[in-house]
Image: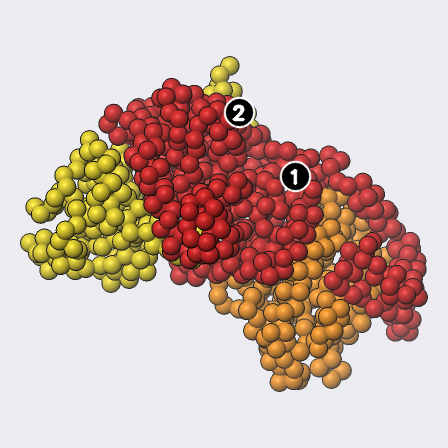
Amino acid sequence: MSHSERSDIFLLDAERTTWHDETLWFVREKRDKAVYATPEFQKLRQLASDIKDHTLSRLDFYLQQFEENARRNGVHVHWAADATEHNAIVLGLLRQHGATRVVKSKSMLTEECHLNPHLLANGIEVIDTDLGERIIQLREEAPSHVVLPAIHLKKEDVGDTFHKYLGTEKGNNDPQQLTETARQHLREKFLAGQVAISGVNFAVAETGTVVVCTNEGNADLGVNLAQVHIACMGMEKLIPRLSDLSVFTRILTRSATGQPITTYTSHFTRPAEGKELHIVIVDNGRTQQLGRPDFRASLKCIRCGACMNTCPVYRRSGGHSYDFTIPGPIGAILSPNIDMRKHASLPFASTLCGSCTDVCPVKIDIHTQLYKWRQVLGEAGKLPASKKWSMRLLSRVLAKPGMYSAGGKVARQALRLLPHGLTHGQGYNPWAIARELPEPPQQSFREWYAQQPQNDKA
Amino acid sequence: MKVALFVPCYVDQFYPQVAIASLQLLEKLGVRAHFPKQQTCCGQPMANSGCEQDAKPVYHNFVDAFQDYDYVVGPAGSCVYHVRKHFDIIEQTPAVQHVRTNTLELFDFIINVLGITEIPGSFPHKVGLHLSCHGQRGLHQANESEMTPVRDGQLRRLLSGLQGLELTELTRNDECCGFGGTFCVSEAGISARMGQDRVQDHVRNGTQVLTGGDMSCLMHLEGIVRRQKLPVRVLHAAEILNGVIIG
Amino acid sequence: MSSREKILAAVTANQPAEVPLPTVPFFEGDASVEKFTALVQAIGGRVVEVAALAHLEEVVRQLFPADYRMASPLLSSTNVSVDAQTPLAVLADVELAVLQGEFGVAENGAIWLPEENMLHRALPMITQHLALVLSQQQLVATMHQAYARLATVGGYGTFLAGPSKTADIEQSLVIGAHGARSLTVLLVP
C-alpha cells in the first residue's frame, strides 16, 4: 500500500482526524511559545547544525575517540553493522548474564532494528517502560511518533487496553488514574529487571559519556536498578564536546514539546561499582546515507519530532500511514535509503510546504531532500508507470509553445462542453472528489493578449 | 526597464483575468510589461513528480522565452520559486543565471524593484489572506510562524493599506492549503482535507473575500469553496489591487 | 574484517571534507532566584526558601509527614539508611529523599545532581518524593554556564528538572510517572 492509500483509511474517521490534527498542532504551538521566548534560538539552531555538520565530517575520528574514552571508563563498546548484528549482540549479552527478562526505555534505534520481536522469539520477556511505549506494546502496535509513541490513541483506547491487560475498571479513561496504574504495574517490573536497555540521545566523544533524556524517569530507574545497562545508539548520535550539550539540551525539548528541558538529562560515563555498562554502536545503513551528499544531512536528526508536529500531512494521516519506524517528514527522507521500493511513496507524501525545514532544530533541509528523493526515485524507475509517461508527455507539450496553445484550447473546450458528471467523475478524477474544477474561460490569456490592438506581437 | 509578464500555464488557461489584472496593475504603476508568447510553463509539475530530467526542455524553453528581459514578473510565488531554486540542473549559462536571478513574484517586484509600498484605494470587505508556502517560506515574502509570532509580510502590508479593508486573523496563519501541485491528485484525500480545514479557518473567522499571491493555492481553495457552496469569493490579490486603482 | 573495521572504513570513505567546529558563545541570561523559582514552578516543582541551613530539619518536618520513610545524608532524623549496596526492597519503600543539589539553572529549573550526592543511583527516581537542597548562591543563567561549571560529569549525574511527568495519554500532563511524584527545592542562603 502507498502512503495515500493508508492515509485514506485514517481519513475515514473525520472526527478522529480532526482530533489528531489539533492535538499535534497544540504541541507545535507549545514549541512556538518556547522558541519565541528564547531570543538566541535561531543562533542555537545554526550552532547545532554546524556542530553536527562538523561531527559528520570527522565521524571516523569521533567514533574512535568515543570508543577509547568509553573503554577507559570501564564501558564495553560493541559495533553492529546492521540490525541483525545489533540484535545478536543484545541477545548474547542477555544470555551471558542468564537474563530472561529485560526492561527497556524508549529507543527508536531498537524499534528500527525490531529488537523486541527478536528477543521474544528467543524466550526473553521484554517490558517497555515508557508509558506510551508500554501502551502500544500491550496493543501490539508500532509507535506512531518518535516522541509521543501513542499519540494516535485516545484515552478511551488506553482505558480499554488497560482494562484488558492491567485490570483497571472498564470505562476508566482518566489519564491520571491510568498513569498511576502503569506506575504501579511497571514498578514491579523495574524491581525485577535483570538487564535494562536504554536508547541514547547524545554520545560525547571527548568523555565517552552517553546522555539519555526522559520525562518519566523510566530510563534512569531501569538502568540504575538493573545489574547490566545496555545503551543502544545509532552512530550519528555523537557530538564532540561536553560543552556542545549546552546547545542540544536547549533546543531538544523546546522543539519537541515546548518544555525548557526534560525532567531527567542523565549522563552515564562509568558503570556503578560492581555493575556493567555496554554501549552498542549501530550502522544499519547510516554509512550509506553518509555517502549520499544530497541526503547525509538527514543524519543530523536528534529525533525531536518537531517536523511531525508541524507537518500538515502527518497530522492528518497519522504516523502509521508512513509504515516506517520514523514517520513524518524526517522518516520520508530516511526510509528510501533503507528500502527504496517499499518506501517509494513517502517522499511524495508532502506538499513541499517547507515548514519541516523551518522548525528543524538542526536545520536539516528536509523539504529539499524530499524533492531530491523524488528525482532519485524517478531515475531509478520507482515511479508508477502512468505517472512517468504522463509527465513525459506533458514535458513534450510544454516544451513546444504551439502544441501547448492548441492543446490548452482543446482541453478547455472539452471541459466547457462535456457534462459536469463526466468531467467530475470521481472514479477517474481525484481532483473532483472534494473540489470543483475551475470554470474554463472562453479565451486563454494568450488569446486575449493577441487580440489587444495596443500589444506588440513580438 | 524591459519587463516580461510570466503567466503560468494554468493561469493562462483557466484564470486569464488574473494575468490581465497583473498586466493592468503593472501598467497603472508605470510599467508596461510584455507577454512573450513563446512561454509555456516553469516545469514544476514534472519536477515535483520526480521527472526533473524530463522537464529540462521546458526549462530551456522558459529561459529562451525570457532571456532578453530585465525582469520576469509572475503572479505565482510557487512557479517563481521553482525557476529561482530548481533551474540549477541545467547548464548555468549567463542567460540561465540572468533569468533565475531576475524572475520575481509580482508583489515582490512591485515592492522591492518599483519601491511601491502603498497602493491607494478602497476595498471595504473582510479579506482573508492565504499565504503561499513557496512565496512565504521559499521567497521570504512573509514572516513565518516557525520563527516569530509577528504576522507581517508584503501582501499583508499592501492589503492593509486599502481603505475599509479588514484582514481576517486566522487561527493558523500560515498552514499549507494542501494543493502541492501533483500532490493534489496523488494524495487527493489528504489534499482535500487540508484544503477543507484551511477554508474552514477562513469561514470561522469571517472571511468574505479569500485572496493571495498564488493562484495555484487559490484554484484548489476555490474548488472547495464552490463544491461546498460557501459564501466566500476567491480573488487573486492582483485582481483586488488592480480593481481599486482608478486607472 | 570485524564490523568495527568495516564501519570505520565505510565512514572514512563516505564522510565529506572536514568543516570547522564552531565555538559556542557564552549566551548570558537572568540567573536570579525569581527566574529560577518561576521555572521550577512552571515545570511542576515547588521552591521553599529556608532562612538558614540550621532550619533545614525543621522545614522538612513541616513540609512532609513525620512518618515518611526518609533517606538523606543531610539530616539526622532519617529513618532509612541508603548506600550503593542497599537492597532494592529497601529502596522501593523510600518515601522521601532529601539530597544536596550542586547548582541550579534559571532558564529551565534544572538542578545538577551528581552520583556522589545520591546515596544510590536509583534513589532520586525511586523515592516517592524528592527534596533537593540548593544554595541561592549556586544559580547560573543558562545551560552554557551550567556545562562550563562541570569540569567532569563524574560516573553518573543528572540535570533534574521538576517531578517525573508524562503526557503520553492524549497530551494530558500527569505528574508522577515513574520517578518522584513531587520535587521540592529547599533554597538555602
Residue at disc 1, secondary structure: loop
Work out whether residue B52 or residue B95 is closer to the camera in this orientation and state it: B52
A444 vs B110, left or right, is: right
Residue B233 sits in quarter: bottom right
Q: Nearer the viewer, residue A16 or C46?
A: A16
User: Percent x, y for residue A403?
Assistant: 91, 53
Q: Are marks 2 and 1 in contact (CB under 8 Å)?
A: no
Residue ID at (60%, 33%): A338
- Which image quarter holds the N terminus of chain A? top right
Q: Which residue is mark 1?
A: A343
Chain A colour is red
What residue do we see at 61% from left, 41% from top? A323
On screen, A183 above or below A240?
Answer: below
The colour one sees for chain C in the rendered image is yellow
Q: Picture coordinates of residue C11 (x, y %)?
A: 51, 27
Chain B rendering hue: orange
Q: CA distance from mark 2 to mark 1?
A: 21 Å
**Callout 2: residue from which chain?**
A
Q: Chain of mark 1?
A: A
Q: Disc 2 designates what residue?
A: A84
Which mark, residue A114? none
Nearest the camera: A134 or B201? A134
Name the amino acid, label 2.
Thr
